[in-house]
Image: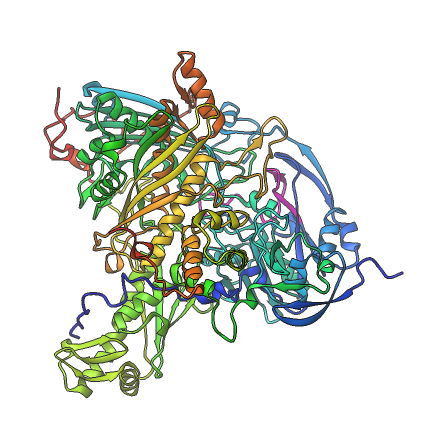
Amino acid sequence: MAPPDAKTKIALELNGEAVEVAFAPHKTLLEVVREDLGLTGTKHGCELGECGTCTVLLDGTPVLSCLVLGLACAGRRVKTVEGMAERGTLHPLQEAFAELGAAQCGYCTPAFLLAAEALLAATACPSRDEIKQALSGNLCRCTGYLKIYEAVELAAARMRGEDAQPAPETLYGVR
Amino acid sequence: MASVKQPTPFRVVGKAHRKVDATAKVTGVTRFADDLFLPRMLFAKLLRSPHPHARIVSIDTSKASALPGVKATLTGKDLPIPFGILPVSQDEHALALDKVRFVGDPVAAVAATSEEAATEALDLITVEYEVLRPFPDALDAVEHPEPTIHDYADAGNIHKLIDLEFGDVEATFAQADLVREDLFFFEGNTHLPMEQHAAVADWSTDGKLTLWSATQTPHYVHRALAKVLELPAARIRVIACPNGGAFGGKSDPFSHEIVVAKLAMITGRPVKITLTREEVFYCHRGRHPTLMWVKTGVTQDGAITGMHFKSLLDGGGYGSYGVASTYYTGALQTVTYHVPRYKFQGARAFTNKPPCGPKRGHGTPQPRFALEVHLDKIAEQLGMDPAELRLKHLVPPNSLTANWLRIGTMGLGPCIEKVVRGSEWNQRFKQLPYGKGIGLACSSYITGAGLPIYWNAMPHSGVQLKCDRGGGVTVFCGSTEIGQGSDSILATIVAEVLGLHPFDIAVVTGDTDLTPVDLGSYSSRVTLMTGNAAIQAAERARDVIALHAGKKLETPIERVTFAEGRVFDVQDPERGLTFAEAVQLAEAAEGTIGTVGSYTPAPSAGKYRGAGVGPSPAYSYSACVAEVDVDPATGIVRVPKIWIAHDVGRAINATTVMGQIEGSVYMGLGEALMEEMAYRGNRNVVHKIPSLLEYKSPTTLEMCDVVTYVVEDPDPNGPFGAKECGQGPLLPVPPAVANAVYDAVGVRIDEVPITPEKVFKALRRKEKGEPPRFGPAAFPDIPWPAPTRVPPPWEGGDGKAVPLTPGASPGIPIGSHPGLGPGVRKR
C-alpha cells in the first residue's frame, strides 16, 4: 500500500487551461494552487474558513480554497486571480479596483475580485445591498469596504457597456 | 545656484492617481513574505508556552531532533541576548530563556523539510515548567507587586510610572465654575492584518544573512538581528516585503524573525516561517487596555481652566513600545482645545498576556475617547451645544501648548463646521426620536514622532535618487509599503518636482542593502518625512539638470521649467528639451546624475524628561459625527452613517487620502462596537477568541456609510503642505458613537467596545432609577513618583523642569495672561 502522503495526480482546468498536478492527498486546494501549481496570487488569512481571503472560483462559484480538498477538484474548473486579466488587459473589476484604491495592501484583493466576478456573472446590475451580501464573507481591514463597493459598481456599469466614470466625491471626498 | 521655480498649480500632487503598485495588487503579482519559495527551503515552527507565567525548569528537544526531516532545533540558550524595540526595555528573548510570561510565549523552535514534520516535531519537545502566579490584568498587577513578572520595573509589577505637571491644576479647579470627574475604560484590541506574519531567512556561506519579512520597520529589525545574532550589521540585509496590512502590528522586531535567521545560519539552508492566525494573536502589540480618570475645570462658557488625567495601561508580558504608549496616553490632550494647566499621571503594568504596543493611533485613541465623552457631559451640564463648546475653545494655530507641543496649522474649526453642516447637526441633535441619536467628537494626531526610537542625531528619512539617461528616475528609500501608499507618495512627489508622471518613477523601498534609512512605517511619519527628503533629492537633481538644460537652451536658469516630461523656457515653452535629453546633457557635463535628500524634524520645544513623546512636525485634525440606531430591547447599536472631516494639510494623492480616512473610520467603528482582546482571567489567562471568526470585526454588513470631507490647510512643515491622514481619523469615531448612544437612549457607555450587553445593562439601571451608565467605578491607588514640574509657556517656563519646591506654586493668573484665551476669566 502506498504511504498516506504519497502524491496523487489529478487533471483540472485552471484559468482556462488543462493542467495535471500531483500532490499529497491531504492538501487543500489553497495549498495545491500556491505550492504545487505555483500561483501565489491566492492568499490566506486563517486557513480555517473564516476570512474569505483564499476565495477562488470552482466551476464559477466562489469557494474558500482552504476548506476544499485538492482531490475534490479533479475534472473541475478552477479560476484564480491570475486568470482574470486576458492577454495583458485587466478585467474591468481589476481596472476599477486599481483606479479607486479599492486595493490598499492588496492582500484580500484577489478574493474580493473573484467574489465580485461571480456576483457580476449572475447579476449585471447589482444593488449596493446585493454587493454587500455577496462580499460579506470576505474581510478587508484596510478599506472599510467602501471603495470596493464603488469599484464593483463602476466595473458593473462598464461591463454593461456604459461609459461610467467615478464620481468626484469618490475620488476627492466632499470639498 | 539660482533656484528653479515650482510650477503652480500642481500638476501631479493633489490629483487622484492609481497607486504605482495598484496593478501588481489587483493581479496578485505582489510578492508578500509567504509567497517566497526558495530552493531547499526549510519550514520553521515555534513551540509556545501553555502557561501564562512559569519558570522553565528544563527543555528536552532530543526526540524532536531525531524525527526524520528535522534539521535543527533551538531553545532560548541558543539566542541568549535580549532585544526589544525601545532601548529602555530590552526585555524579550527570541525564545524564552528562563521564564514564560504569557500563553503563547515562544519557547523552542524547529526547522524541518516540511511544515508537517516541523509541527510533528513540536509535539516531541518536552518542557518542564514551574508554574507561577499569573497576573490577568493591570489592577491585579498593581495590587500584587510579587512575584515580579520582570526583574526590572518602576515598582513591583508596574513597568512605568509617569507624573508630569504643567502648572498647578488644583488651583484652577478651585476657581472653575464647574469641575467634573469621570472614569473610562478602553478595552484592548488588535490589528488583525489579513496577512499572517511571515519571514524567510537565507544564510550564505560567505557570512551574509538575508531576511525577508512582513515588517513595517526593517531598520529596527536590522538592528535587532545584529544585536542578537552578534553579526556585523553590514553583513545583514533586511528586506521588508509589502505588508498585507499591518496597522502597527508589524513594527516590533519579532521572535520568529530572529529564529528563522538563526535556523538558516545553523542549517545553511533558507528557512521560512508563516505564523498561524492564532499565533498572530499572540504576537499582538495591539491597543493597551486602559483605565482612565479625568478631572476638568471649566468656566460657564466651556473654557477649560485645568485638566488632570490619569491612565493605567495593561501592558501584557513585555515592554514593546509600552513606555512610549504610556506617555502617549497623556500627550495629546492639549492639542485640540486650549488647556492652560495640565497634569498627567500614567502607569503601565506588566501582566501575563500577549504584549501590547502600537496600534493605529498609538496610545491616543483611549484618552481621546475619554476626553471627548467627558466634554460631551460637560457641555450638557453647562447647557451648551457640544460643537459650539469645542469651536469656542480651539487651540490657536502657531502656538505652544501647556506641555510644550508646537502647533502649526490647525484645521479643526473647519472640520467641525463641515460635519455639523453635513449631518444637519443643529436640526437633529437632541431632536431625534428615542432610539436614534447623533454624537460628535474630534481628535488630533501627530504627523510623525519628533524623536527617533533610539537617540541619534541622524536623519529620520533618507532618499537617494538616480536619473537615467533614458529619462527614467529611480527613488531609493527605506520606507515600507504597508498598503498605505508610501511608494506612490515617493513617486508622486518626485514626479511633481521633475515634471514627470508618477509611472515614470521607479521606486525601490524597504531594503537595508539598497535604500538609505527611513525609520519605518509608524507614527504617521512617512508622507511627511520621506516626502520632505524626496523633495530635497528631487530639487537637487532638478537644479543640476536645469543648469545644463539652461545652457543648451540659452535660457536663464530661473526660467527653466519642468513639466509634462519636458524641460523648457517658461516664457517660451516651445523652446525646450525632453527630460531624457536634459538628463543626458547634465550627465555628459557632470557624470552620473544621482542626488540625496534627508529629513530631520526640528528640535522639540519641551526639554523635560518625557518631552520626547508628543512633539511632531505637524498635527492633523479630525471631526466626526456618528448616527446610531439603538434597539432598547436588546441593546444592539447599529451605525448607519458617519460624517468625517479631516485636515490633511494637503492631499498628495487624493485616492490614497480617501482610502486612509475611510479605512480609519472603519477601524474606529470596529473598536467602538465590537473589537476586543478577551481573556479568561480565571482560567489560566487563555485568550478567549484567537480566531478571525470569534474576534469580531466589521464585515460589509456592519460597515456604515461614510461622508468624507477633506480639509486642506497646507502646513509649512509638510511636503507641499501635507499632514497625516492614516491614523487620526480613527480617533474620533469611538467617542462620537458613545455620544450618539447617549443622544439616542440616554445612557452613558463609558467603556469601549459598546456591546449590546453594556447598553442593555445601562438601560436596566436607568429603568431602576440608578445612574444610567456602564463603565468603571474606581481608579486604583498608584505609587506615583514625585512629579516633574514644567511651567507652561505662559507661566514663564523655558520648557525645562523646575526643581520641586513644596508650597512654591505660583499664583493663579487666570484672565491675566494671553495664554488662557479670551473666554476665561476669574469668577
Dividing the picture into quadrants, the one containing residue B377 is top left
B248 lies above or below B206: above
Q: Is residue B483 visible?
A: no
In magenta stretch: residue B104 = yes
Q: Which of B207 and B589 is in front in this view?
A: B589
Name the image quarter holding the C terminus of chain B.
Answer: top left
Q: Residue furthest right?
A: A1
Q: Give the range drawn in magenta.
A: B85-108
Residue B217: image location, x then y, percent: 45, 55
Q: Which of B227 and B378 is in front in this view?
A: B378
B552 lies above or below B390: below
Dividing the picture into quadrants, the one containing residue B393 is top left
B684 lies above or below A33: above
Residue B648: image location, x then y, percent: 28, 51
Residue A7: image location, x then y, percent: 78, 64
Residue B434: image location, x then y, percent: 36, 24
Horizontally, residue B660 falls left or right of residue B552, namely right
Horizontally, residue B270 falls left or right of residue B808, namely right
B389 lies above or below A28: above
Q: Can residue B656 be seen in this view?
A: yes
Horizontally, residue B481 falls left or right of residue B689, namely left
